[in-house]
Amino acid sequence: MVLDLNVTVITSKHFIYNFCITYISVLISRNFIDNMERAIQQIAQTMERQLDLELEKLDALDSGDLEAIRQQRLNEMKQRAKQKQEWLANGHGEYTEIDGEKEFFTVCNKSENLVCHFYRHDSPRCRIFDMHLKILAKKHVETRFVKMDAEKAPFLTGRLKIRVIPTLALVKANKTKDFVVGFTDLGNRDDFSTEMLEWRIARSEVIEYSGDILTPPTEGKKKSVHIQSKKAIRGRQDSDSDLSD
């Protein structure tokens, strides 16, 4: 009889404990849901007020205001078209080779944004960069895309401390903002996408980019491509070249 009583007491305590836990959980859940509903309602009200303000601004515009906006937009389009013509006249829109260090500084003075590929003829990875940069040059006419034989530019490569080939120098307003050294920032793979290189260059603000600058584009599942170098560099094949060779 005593045993049964103890079991009953223990069972009752267990029931009361579970009941309390359940009750508290329900209160917490209700409180959380109430807070979420209030937060969502506040956000909706804020967005509604902002929309109302924009509509009020549009309603307040008269025909003269609308014409001024249209004229401003038209002027912006004309200015953009004029700027594009100037870019094309300065060699933008094409991926070209510059001959010597003197021409590099001339190009920098003429173009606000510049991507310069320092390459070597015996580097297969330089040809991979060539393929992508040709595409980007046509897409981003606001930026000049060029290449230079690193072995013909000892002063420039020394000044920029370029030791690995291929290297992209990213220049803005006559100042070197950044470097893309080899393929390390591109997933360290030979079959990276043009979009990946575009995103990496955009991080240095030398091209106009409409995507998410904080997140690299999704790389599809692709079979790795291994390119064998014709010439070993420091005893290794298919590696980034060192200019000190």
Image (tube, grey):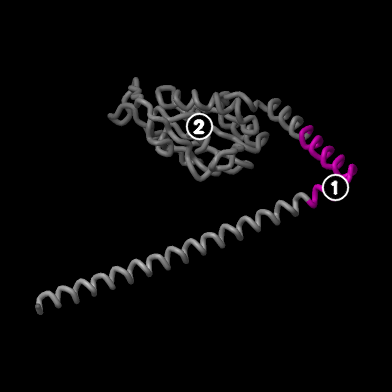
**Which residue occupies the foreground of this view, 244 or 64?**
64
For disc 2, the neighbor class at 10 Å (few under 14, some 14 to 19, many from 20) is: some
User: Is 242 a magenta residue?
Assistant: no
The answer, for residue 158, to whether it is visible in the render is: no
Is residue 54 positioned above or below 10 on the image? above
Q: Residue at x 66, y 54 (%)?
A: 47
SS of the residue under disc 2: helix
**Which residue occupies the foreground of this view, 69 or 43?**
43
Q: Residue at x 84, y 38 (%)?
A: 71
The answer, for residue 7, to whether it is visible in the render is: yes
Counting from the top left corner in percent of width and height, residue 74 is at 81, 35
Instruction: Please say if the residues under marks 2 and 1 sit with CB atoms less than 8 Å apart.
Output: no
Spatial CA distance of label 2 from label 1 is: 42 Å
Q: Earlier in the sequence, mark 2 or mark 1?
A: 1
Counting from the top left corner in percent of width and height, residue 122 is at 40, 22
The magenta segment: 56-78
Specify whether 6 is left or right of 178: left
SS of the residue under disc 1: loop
**Which residue occupies the foreground of this view, 21 or 5?**
5
For disc 1, the neighbor class at 10 Å (few under 14, some 14 to 19, many from 20) is: few
Q: Residue flagged by tag 2: what amino acid is it?
A: Glu
From the image, tell me which residue sits under label 2. 195
Chief SS of the magenta region: helix
Specify whether 103 is left or right of 23: right
Disc tally is 2
Badge nearest the viewer, 2 or 1? 1
Specify whether 129 is left or right of 18: right
Q: Residue flagged by tag 1: what amino acid is it?
A: Leu
From the image, tell me which residue sits under label 1. 61
